[in-house]
Amino acid sequence: MVRTGSVAGPTLAVVAREAGVSVPTASKVVNGREDVAPETRRRVTEALDRLGYVRRPRFEASKAPGLVDLVVHSLESSWSGAVLHGVEGAAHDAGLEVVVSAGLTRTRGGRPERGWLDKLTTRGSSGVLFNLAELTPSQYAWLDQHRIPFVMIDPVHEPPPGVVSVGAANWQGGLLATEHLLSLGHERIAVIGGYRRKICSSDRIAGYRSALASAGIRHRPEYIRYGSFDETVAHSRMLELLDLPEPPTAAFVCSDKMALGAYQALAERKLNVPDDFSVVGFDDLPESRWATPALTTVRQPLSEMAATALRLLVRLMAGDQPEGTRTELSTRLVERSSTGPGPVAQEAAAQVMPPSRCARK
């Protein structure tokens, strides 16, 4: 059935004729389907805008003002637990109910599943929070066309202009982690990042490079490794670093989860943390405190980020556009037991130690 934004508005058949496509193809574009060629999508979208076609959301008549959706990448990590905690607290204060789904899994073809879109329209939620989401252009367009308020929490890529997002000061965190290792006398400092194309990973590595440059130390390309925020990959990357002709003496590992993989690699090489090698993580998840030794890490305020996103979503739902689209919360270093003096500091300490006074018989 063709549905339009107003009684006098153009039908989908008119839009299809204007764009030179079939009605089913035009319907796919309106509904955010992925199986449409980019050029075809462009022609249909331009026709929609030109003719003023606005599809009324299916849930408009039954929309529940007290319900919002939280779409997370996964429910199997303490990261998600921290986000849920922040959203739940802020939603309670705002008198809202939250529906949680792990809806952005991928199909065999590599496309995000559309299940969350269908569920969203069926439930009649007033807005959506996306955590660690990697939305496609057509999905952004679908949300915009249906006038559904949404906020991104730590988006994978830079969102389109006008999209409201909340994240951590990742560049600052990378700077703090590296400056801490420099202050301990380390100069051969490596970094193990997450996905190369993820903005949080690239920002943390940029902070690492900036700290080295400020200390007058040229970063070594062979000391920069990328993983996938996974322990197994980080384990492999650490072994690669240790196999270099001149291996590092410390590493900034861009997530606590990956730091545990780095720990395992160091243990396999009989290297003690922190006497032989220092490690700094990122996140300050519960695992960082449970590790042996307890992990020095950069805390990003996950619960606070999630609560801030929920409050911004409430403003959008009320029709109030925030002044800025990007909100960044500060990161800070949490010192524990996984970092110690580097070779430079150890040599300096050895030079000032008094000679041993062993009694001779």
Image: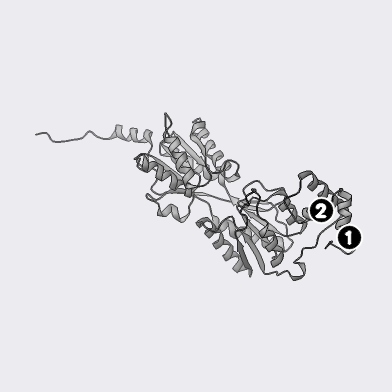
Which one is nearer the viewer's eye here, 105 or 5? Answer: 105
Q: Secondary structure at mark 2?
A: helix
- Residue most extreme to the right: 8
State the residue at coordinates (89%, 55%): 14
State the residue at coordinates (51%, 56%): 77
> To which quarter of the image does residue 361 belong?
top left
Which one is nearer the viewer's eye here, 289 or 183? Answer: 289
From the viewer's perspective, is the residue at label 2 or at label 1 nearer?
A: 2
Q: Secondary structure at mark 1?
A: loop
Q: Is residue 55 above or below residue 270?
A: below
Q: Is residue 202 left or right of residue 57?
A: left
State the residue at coordinates (81%, 50%): 45
User: At which x and y percent is residue 54?
Assistant: 82, 58
User: At which x and y percent is residue 158?
Assistant: 66, 46
Label 2 and label 1: CA atoms lie apart by 16 Å
> To which quarter of the image does residue 278 belong?
top left
Q: Is residue 17 left or right of residue 261?
A: right
Question: For residue 9, which numbered disc appears in the image?
Answer: 1
User: At which x and y percent is residue 91?
Assistant: 61, 66
Q: Does residue 238 appear anywhere in the picture?
A: yes
Q: Is residue 354 above or below residue 333?
A: above
Q: How many marks?
A: 2
Quadrant of the rendering where the N terminus is positioned: bottom right
Label 1 neighbour load within 10 Å: few <14, some 14-19, many 20+: some
Q: Say whether disc 2 or disc 1 marks the residue closer to the N-terminus.
A: 1
From the image, tell me which residue sits under label 2.
26
Amino acid at pointer 2: Ala
Question: For residue 288, which numbered disc appears in the image?
Answer: none
